[in-house]
Image: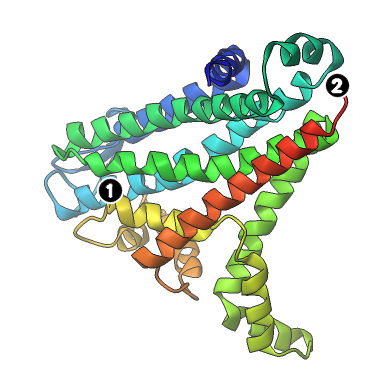
Amino acid sequence: MSSLIAIAYDTLTLLCRRRLFWLNVWLSVVVVVVVASMSCHGTGWSLGFGLKSWPSGYLVKGSPWESTLFFGVVQRATQWWVAGAAPLLALFSMASVVPKTLKSGQAALLFPKTQSRAAVLLGRFAGGVIFAAIPALICVTGLFLTLGWRLGVWEIRLFLALPFALLLFSALAAVTVMLGVLTKSSSASLVVTLIFAASVMALQDAASHPEGAEDEADLKGIVQSASGGSLALQIFTWPLPRTHELMEGMSRAIRLSGPRPFRDLVRRWRIGNLRVGVAAAEVLDATAEMPAPPVTPLKLSEAVLVTTGFCGLALIAAIVLLNRRDL
């Protein structure tokens, strides 16, 4: 256990010295600053701490649309950055850790000092997860303080985004670790992991919207059994990380919803004489045309268990591969 903790700490300090870490941190700060720079006043709303203002008859200080604005923006910043882009950016640094560890010179110095190779691999993995947690924690803390400053609302539930984001990252990090042992190549493990993540999201989206898949098949003239194809797809995607269910579960756990739907606010948005909200609202409506079944607490628990089990199996496979490798 002591060697595992020491390797995790060594991995964390190694990753924190890289420029990608500081890029991730500063981008998290930028996300917080942009959200905090938004404000509503007596005649409209502004961006950039008052540097640019737009008059509005409804989006004013103290109106229900003000809380709708901040809750909607913070909710999407949490989904798209804390649980989306920031973990992917951390994955770029994580991908090179295991291949560099397996290089002949470093392996000769590191592995003789530990009792098991599993401790080295798990320590690298744990250090990478902690590394990804730092920018996420910075961003969530900043968004929490922003809501308290702008609205006087201290939503402690916002910190529930952290375990969901780290679980999603852990699944991808475990795949990266396994591929790093298998290929000993940073670029190969990163590219294959990104392809895997995109494939999982696409397959789960197709499995959750069988009606849309059937319509596309009819348009292309492909004869298939929709029920049988959907069932086979659901069986195939069942043991994979539950990306969609975890993201929706995170949204339900945070429960940031204003008195009005955020989509209605986007639809009414104007910048000068330009109704920029119309196109944005169409994008939001397009994602809701074929809604997936709601995530119940039972489904969310299943998603957490399946994703955790997948992560564990990937790490076990990496350990087995490492024990069979000559170093």
Q: Amino acid at mark 1?
A: Phe
- Secondary structure, mark 2, is loop
Q: Quadrant of the C terminus?
A: top right
> Please, is residue 94 above or below residue 205 in the view?
above
Crowdedness near tag 2: few (<14), some (14–19) or many (≥20) residues, C-alpha within 10 Å? few
> Please, is residue 30 above or below residue 182 in the view?
above
Lateral position of residue 38 relative to residue 234, left or right? left
Rounded to the nearest whole Å, what is the CA distance between mark 2 and mark 1? Answer: 52 Å
Residue at 65% x, 85% y is: 214
> Please, is residue 26 above or below residue 170 in the view?
above
Q: Nearer the viewer, mark 2 or mark 1?
A: 2
Crowdedness near tag 1: few (<14), some (14–19) or many (≥20) residues, C-alpha within 10 Å? many
Which numbered disc flags the more N-terminal residue, 2 or 1? 1
Mark 1 highlights which residue? 71
Look at the image and tell me whether residue 312 can be seen.
Answer: yes
Residue 91, picture quadrant? top right
- Total labels drawn: 2
- Secondary structure, mark 1, is helix
Q: Amino acid at mark 2?
A: Leu
Q: Are marks 2 and 1 in contact (CB under 8 Å)?
A: no
Look at the image and tell me whether residue 59 can be seen.
Answer: no
Q: Nearer the viewer, residue 137 or 325?
A: 325
Mark 2 highlights which residue? 327
Residue 199, picture quadrant? bottom right
Q: Nearer the viewer, residue 167 or 219?
A: 167
Q: Nearer the viewer, residue 152 or 100?
A: 100
Lateral position of residue 138 relative to residue 15, left or right? left
